[in-house]
Amino acid sequence: MTEVWIIAHDATGGNALACAARALGDRVVAISLGAGVLPGADLSLTVQVSPEVPVEAYACAVADLLSARGAQLVLTDATTTGRLLAGQVAARLGVSPLTASGVVRGNSLQVTRLVYGGLAVATDEVISPVCVLVVAPGALTAEESVRAGQSEAVSLTPAGGLRLVETRAKGGTSVDLTGAKRVVGVGRGFAAEADLELARALAVKLGAEVACSRPIAEGVNWMPAERYLGVSGATIKPELYLAIGISGQVQHLVGVNHSKVIVAINSDKNAPIFAHADFGVVGDLYQVLPELTKSL
Ligand SMILES: Cc1cc2nc3c(=O)[nH]c(=O)nc-3n(C[C@H](O)[C@H](O)[C@H](O)COP(=O)(O)OP(=O)(O)OC[C@H]3O[C@@H](n4cnc5c(N)ncnc54)[C@H](O)[C@@H]3O)c2cc1C
């Protein structure tokens, strides 16, 4: 029987990871750091975490528990907390963590990951007895599964030296683009911030989230950083992605090329995005968008 271990730090994300982990083994065991019993796991080792301690402070104790239980394959999600946990757990176990854009378990474990800013894909064969993987969104196909999973309470001692003083909600609205079925992406083809209303009106008609290329978020600051897509932003897997006034540089494509259907609107017929789009409109977004929105 092949066993896959996950480290969960929130109930929803942890359960999604437990379901995805099933693609790699017969039995999923979760170390649940304050995330409760996960219905997607066969066994949840539940840890009562102190609200005064950052969850990463449990990393060394988690690594020791994994060692004691003989875990060989350990997964975290690709959130900031997941990555922090993976790095510290892997260091304690004496291996390097890998960020996986895909995983295949055959005779050996093969992990694909993006390199050179998303220009190429490297495939690594895991030869160490223990492997810690950060699972990028879309790397594993999650099957919704509910087990009559068992649970066992375990007590772990966090590392000292850090005390959580305060947590507060970020300003603005928060969005989970990774779960969106339709996404409208805006780029530098928009000449002014107010013009984004054209894309928002279309998104309302489509029931879509609005996202953007990096310069829109980190250059002109017209949208929050959590809404940009790409190698250093969010990765999405919607049924429909509309790229409007976006040239289609590789760093952007890495975040959107798992979309089922890509539609591009761009005034330059040679824009690279057209080589990756299922449908393309060569035209001025200022003419195309009002017409498109009106027709829906
Ligand atoms: C290390 C690194 C990491 C990066 N990470 C990311 C990332 O994660 N995500 C990301 O998006 N970028 C990232 N970038 C930036 C990336 O290389 C591109 O610069 C960026 O994606 C370009 O954004 P854009 O397509 O909006 O702008 P541009 O490349 O300027 O494209 C604008 C497009 O709009 C079209 N256009 C202009 N006017 C109109 C009009 N009226 N109607 C229709 N079309 C019009 C133009 O023809 C053009 O194709 C990264 C870069 C580096 C170096």
Image (cartoon, rainbow, N blue to C red):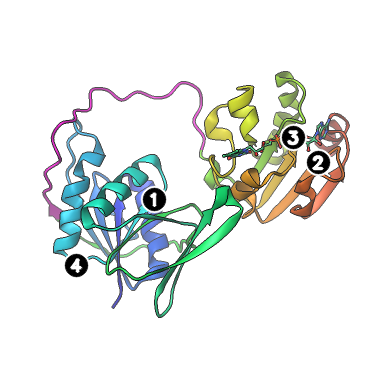
Quarter that holds the C terminus: top right
What's the residue type where badge 4 is placed? Gly
Residue 130 seen in render? yes
What's the mark number on residue 202?
A: 3
In percent of width and height, residue 290 lies at: 84, 31
Determine whether the residue tagged by mark 4 lies in a helix, strand or loop. Answer: loop
Mark 2 or mark 4: name the one nearer the start of the chain.
4
Mark 2 or mark 1: name the one nearer the start of the chain.
1
Is ligand 1 less than 8 Å from the beta carbon at label 1?
no
Identity of the residue drawn at 38% across and 40% down? 80
Q: How much space separates mark 2 and mark 1, taking CA atoms?
A: 33 Å
Mark 3 or mark 4: name the one nearer the start of the chain.
4
What's the mark number on residue 207?
A: none
What's the mark number on residue 77?
A: 1
What's the residue type where badge 2 is placed? Ile
Is ligand 1 less than 8 Å from the beta carbon at label 4?
no
Select label 3 or label 2 by which is in front: 2
* Magenta highlight: main SS: loop
Q: Is residue 15 left or right of residue 54?
A: right
> What are the residue bounds of the magenta stretch?
153-175
Residue 66 falls in which quadrant of the image?
bottom left
The residue where tag 2 is placed is 265
What's the mark number on residue 70?
A: 4
Q: Is residue 189 left or right of residue 170?
A: right
Q: How much space separates mark 3 and mark 2, taking CA atoms?
A: 13 Å
Measured along the vertical axis of the image, is residue 47 above or below residue 290?
below
